[in-house]
Image (cartoon, rainbow, N blue to C red):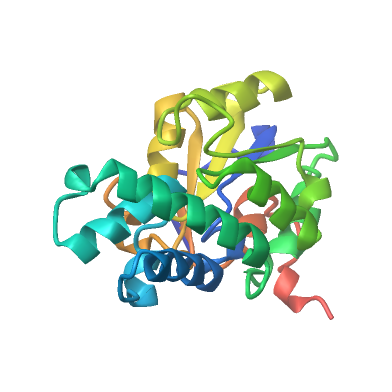
Amino acid sequence: MVRVLQPIPFESIKLVVFDLDGTLIDSARDLCNSVNAALAHMDRPPLPDKIIAGFVGNGAPMMVRRSLAVENNVPVEQVDEHELATAYSFFLDHYREHKLDFTYAYDGALESLAALATRPDGIQRSMAVLTNKPVRPARAICDGLGMGSYFLRIYGGDSFPLKKPDPLGLRTLMEEAGAQPAETVMIGDSKVDVLTARNAGAWSLGCQFGFGPQNLMETPPDVVVDSAFSWTTVLNPAKIDLRQLP
């Protein structure tokens, strides 16, 4: 399914920037396992995966902070900073070791990356990852799943002083790729990614199959898809449907 709210001028797109978690990869189980390992380290009971997965999108520190807030039944701003630092440190150590236990690329993601690297007119596109996940595990996961070579850059939540939805990371990628905002599309699964695109003046493509469909339409993207296969329908419409390939 492709729902077009504002047509993206596919023929002029030079730079395609992807969110990672919930967009290119399903990393929910590994993230949830690492958060619950950190909670156990703090002598706290585990949280359901569905609750933790809903905290993905604003960076790992905020995910852990929100989890502690639920455990303590307090607002996120009242989480004890020492407790947060201890839990976050344990989360990072655990996640570095277990980041690829169950994480996998969504169906169609690798096929679409290969297809999107070249525009229908034969001109090469630049592609990049901009995630709020820490950059070291982000790069390791992309390499481990065989997609790292597609990207000009892979930037994480600790690559810049400000995270998405601040436009700093996306604007940096546009400058490095020599692309204007009107020549750039941000692909992601939550309103954080839509706002990042809006704040940078770029186009936005929303994915309803990720972690953030509950808030994706709060700030509607230009186009909404329900499969990674559909990225090519939007940006390389001259290509055949990748799902029909043998």
| Tally of numbered discs | 0
Residue at the left extreme, as displayed: 74
**Location of residue 146 in the rendering, given as x and y in whole percent from the top left corner:** 81, 60
Q: What residue appears at the point 67 percent right and 34 percent down from the top-left corner?
A: 15
**Location of residue 158 in the rendering, given as x and y in whole percent from the top left corner:** 55, 34
Residue at the bottom extreme, as displayed: 246
In the rendered image, the vertical position of residue 76 relative to residue 199, given as above or below = below
User: Nearest the camera: 243 or 167?
Assistant: 167
* Residue 230 horizontal side relative to residue 87, left or right: right
Q: What residue appears at the point 75 percent right and 77 percent down from the top-left corner?
A: 244
In the rendered image, the vertical position of residue 205 relative to residue 22, given as above or below = above
* Residue 70 horizontal side relative to residue 245, left or right: left
Let me know if residue 221 appears in the view.
no
**Location of residue 136 in the rendering, given as x and y in whole percent from the top left corner:** 67, 44
* Residue 207 horizontal side relative to residue 172, left or right: left
**Quadrant into which the C terminus falls:** bottom right
**Location of residue 23 in the rendering, given as x and y in whole percent from the top left corner:** 55, 58
In the rendered image, the vertical position of residue 163 relative to residue 187, given as above or below = above
User: Nearest the camera: 182 or 74?
Assistant: 74
Let me know if residue 135 appears in the view.
yes
Q: What residue appears at the point 50 percent right and 23 percent down from the top-left corner?
A: 168
User: Nearest the camera: 161 or 164?
Assistant: 161
